[in-house]
Image: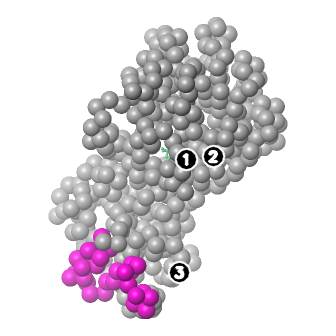
Amino acid sequence: MTFDDFKFDESLMEGLYSMGYKTPTPIQKEAIPVIQEHKDLIACAQTGTGKTAAYLLPIIDHILRSEKRHLNCLIIAPTRELVLQIDQQIDGMGYFCSVGSIAIYGGNDGITWEKQRHALEEGVDIVCATPGRLIALLQSGKINFEHLQHLVLDEADRMMDMGFIDDLKVIINYLPKKRQTIMFSATMPPKIRELAKHISNDPVQVNIAISKPAAGIIQQAYVVHENQKEPLIKEILKNEDYQSVIIFSSTKEKVKDLEKMLRKADGSVKAFHSDLEQNEREEIMRDFKGKRLRVLIGTDILSRGIDVEGISLVVNYDAPPDPEDYIHRIGRTARASKAGVAITFINQRDQVKFFNIEALMGIEVQKMPLPVELGPGPEYNPEKARMDARNQKGKGGGKPFKGKPRFQKKK
Ligand code: AMP
């Protein structure tokens, strides 16, 4: 399944790709179709599963398709930090479309508050708020939910633990009865099911666990310019502790080029790809398993299903497309509770992709210093890389200034 299957608006797809999202995560695969069918949803998914995009994408898409723009969606989250994170994701995904959001939380100064109030009067599509501040706004009559279509409760269990249940009940009384209710919760204790029963209508239930790499794997990454990859791999392979090595690259062509390049330095290297005859592939695998072949190079096809013991090193010569592939690839090492090393090369273009992989796994991979003779590499700054990629798209437009009314239709 790819994001194309959801048939999102083109401008939203642009935002999504500029965020570095290539393939939907499991929670996105399950939740997006349910939300698109306007059914209520109760999803058990933790931070790090891609849950925020799982509800934001179909809601933003729905907003973009609406004839008339009103305040369409209310997202309630327990903390100011989470509210800000959600608002940032709306900014990122909605960068190429005119969807307007506002983050409302307690504890900010009078000027911010005045700005928020003004933006609300002018019109936004999505309000993202903590319960306490939202109640204050509702009671002051400054916010009109008459046309609301989607209610999202994010981290519902945490809101309950923080004692927000009564506030939530008050807020929900202000909302139209006919709406879509979406609840995300990291855990699903009985009190959450009870709440769901009261505020939603025959919800579809979805449960997702996060994939995590095996514990014995030492994960490292080098932040490189593309032209530093070649000398770096040669340098790494000089380490004789790495007796059995798999190198992953992104395409068949690159796999073949790498084979040629590495063969000059070390004879015991073979590429594994679909242009080989069946018997050639079997022979390569036999040699690799029997430790007569030291280095095997392949694409992601190689990461699924090969079961070879004692692989000491996996190198991602090109960063993998998504966390699932990353976990499959590095899972080739450290099998049967032996330690193994997994090294990823991150060029500037892949920084955003790798940052998302780290975020989804909830792990920060150690960034290694480059050997001095290779010269300095780029700095690891995924946010800057994301902005550079956007600027290169040459749209020149992007999302209007935050705080302005955003009800204008796309041109
Ligand atoms: P969340 O679980 O919503 O907190 O998301 C965790 C991280 O994963 C965030 O940094 C998201 O930007 C990122 N993310 C969400 N969906 C995807 C996707 N389909 N591909 C790659 N990264 C994603």
Residue 257 falls in which quadrant of the image? Answer: bottom left
Residue marked by disc 3: 307
Work out whether mark 1 precedes mark 2 in sequence or the reverse, and give the earlier one. Answer: 1
Q: Pick the quarter of the image with the C terminus.
A: top left
Give the answer, above or below, for where 187 lies relative to 143: below
Taking 32 as reference, is 360 left or right? left
Nearer to me, 104 or 322: 322
Tell me if residue 183 can be seen.
Answer: no
Report the Cα–Cα distance between label 1 and label 2. Answer: 7 Å
Specify whether residue 75 is painted magenta: no
How many C-alpha atoms fall within 10 Å of the one at disc 1: few (<14), some, or many (≥20)? Answer: some
Q: Residue at x 48, y 39 (%)?
A: 9
Q: Position of residue 354 (x, y in %)?
A: 41, 53
- Report the span colored magenta: 254-281
Numbered disc in front, either 3 or 2:
2
Residue 33, numbered label: 2
